[in-house]
Amino acid sequence: MKKSKSGYIGFKESRKIVKYNKQQIRYYERLKKRKHIPREEYLATMKNEDNVVEFDDLHTYFFTDTGTVKAVNGVSFDIPAHSTVGVVGESGCGKSVTSLSLLRLVQAPQGQIVSGSIRYKTKDGDCYDITKLPQDMMEKISGKEISMIFQEPMTSLNPVFTIGYQLDEVSLLHIEGATKESAREKSIEMLKLVGIANAEGVYKSYPHELSGGMRQRVMIAMALCCQPNLIIADEPTTALDVTIQAQILDLLRELKDKLDSSIMLITHDLGVIAEMADYVVVMYAGKVIEAGNVFEIFDNPSHPYTIGLLKSKPVINKKVDELYCIKGRVPSAVDLPDYCYFRDRCDMCTSACAGSYPEFVQLSPTHKVACHLYESKVLK
Ligand SMILES: Nc1ncnc2c1ncn2[C@@H]1O[C@H](COP(=O)(O)OP(=O)(O)OP(=O)(O)O)[C@@H](O)[C@H]1O
Ligand code: SF4
Ligand SMILES: [Mg+2]
């Protein structure tokens, strides 16, 4: 994208962007609105039958007036059944957009999944490519099979309806043959399951009458109402204080085991990851830069960015004059370079880093890293 010397986009350039955006949006919206999509088009085969979700080279872009924001730019990772996968990375690196792509909730029309696939294995054992699934089938899956716990319970709950009304709605929408009475019973059972003592009272309350921790418990109850296969928790404890945080995390872990679900846990907090996750995915500027099981990432962090992230975590009993921080800024998602996106901030950079973007190097069957430093250590 050409900018003037002052950094502003000129009129001609701006018109070009608007024209390009219109074309792209029209193309992807038309694809989505197609009727009678043949089943073969969205049927897929899992790479590994033990996975619930496989992100494969996913690209999700936003066509904005300042250019194309490559929010998710070739993301691939798996979520194995019955496990917790933690996704970490700096603000704006594409964690939420990756999870929203999985539920096909990316803000349209400017936000579009432009390429790649998201294979999902349903409770019945069918495998679908979510990116190609017809909208009516997607509605059956989201909420029932894949559910999401949002960061801010106050903005996710509707302030003008009671908790009971909003909980009942989930059962009435997703559970076949549900009646008003059975939905009410289910809602109260779920409120008790998430540790709310006065379930009947909370059922009749409005969101503003509850504390932050209670509201987050209600969100969890709502997400678990249909016993989902996969729970996406996007910063589920960021808005809560430390004690409530610990309670909510314990609750999530306990319910995951009870319901035999998997969790995709998005967080900034490495402590939460260490406690909850079986696998860790580290993202940077719309790409996965390192992935491995929790021991590999914490005991043997390999990418300079992961090393920096772990170094910047304060340690109890260790006195330091200044906390470590990774200098510099993430490159703009509109103007990404051809070389390693971390190069301008990396203090381990070598001459090889001037070349193209690094490919993944497999350090162990579960540990992979995208960095030129490891190219001679490819797993044979
Ligand atoms: N609706 C939108 N329109 C334009 N750009 C967007 C939109 N939503 C997200 N983006 C851009 O996509 C990129 C990734 O955003 P995302 O919300 O996934 O970040 P994140 O990793 O979840 O950050 P955080 O930790 O702050 O929640 C950012 O550069 C953001 O500005
Ligand atoms: S490829 Fe080079 S610049 Fe990029 S993280 Fe590795 S060492 Fe640093
Ligand atoms: Mg986010």
Image: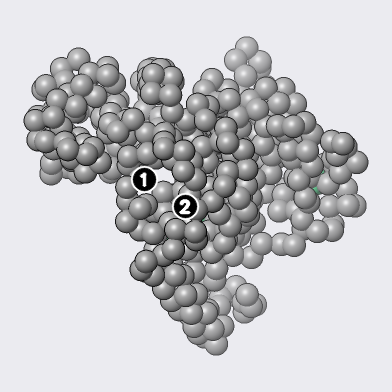
In the picture provided, is 74 more to the left or to the right than 153?
right
- Marking on residue 130: 2
Residue at which label 1 appears: 141
- The N terminus lies in which quarter of the figure? bottom right
Q: Name the residue at the top extreme.
A: 317
Q: CA distance from mark 2 to mark 1?
A: 10 Å
Q: Residue at x 57, y 32 (%)?
A: 50
Nearest to the observer: residue 180 or residue 164: 180
The quarter holding residue 69 reads: bottom right
At 84% from the left edge and 52% from the top edge, which residue is drawn? Answer: 353
Instruction: Compare marks 2 and 1 and give the one earlier in the sequence.
Output: 2
Q: Secondary structure at mark 2?
A: helix
Q: Which quadrant holds residue 307?
A: top right
Badge 2: few (under 14), some or many (20 or more) residues near its Cα, within 10 Å?
Answer: many
Disc 1 Cβ-to-ligand 1 distance below 8 Å: no
Q: Are marks 2 and 1 in contact (CB under 8 Å)?
A: yes
Under mark 2, the amino acid is: Ile
**How far across and down, in percent of the image, does residue 159 sit?**
17, 42
Q: Horizontal and vertical percent for residue 289?
A: 69, 44
In front: 87, or 4?
A: 87
**Where residue 121 sits: x, y (%)?**
48, 41
In the picture, which quadrant includes the C terminus? Answer: top right
Q: Is residue 246 left or right of residue 171?
A: right
- Residue type, mark 1 in image: Ile
Give the residue drawn at x 50%, y 26%: 82
Observer able to see residue 323 = no
Q: Residue 92, which numbered label? A: none
- The residue nearer to you, when weighing 18 against 224, is 224
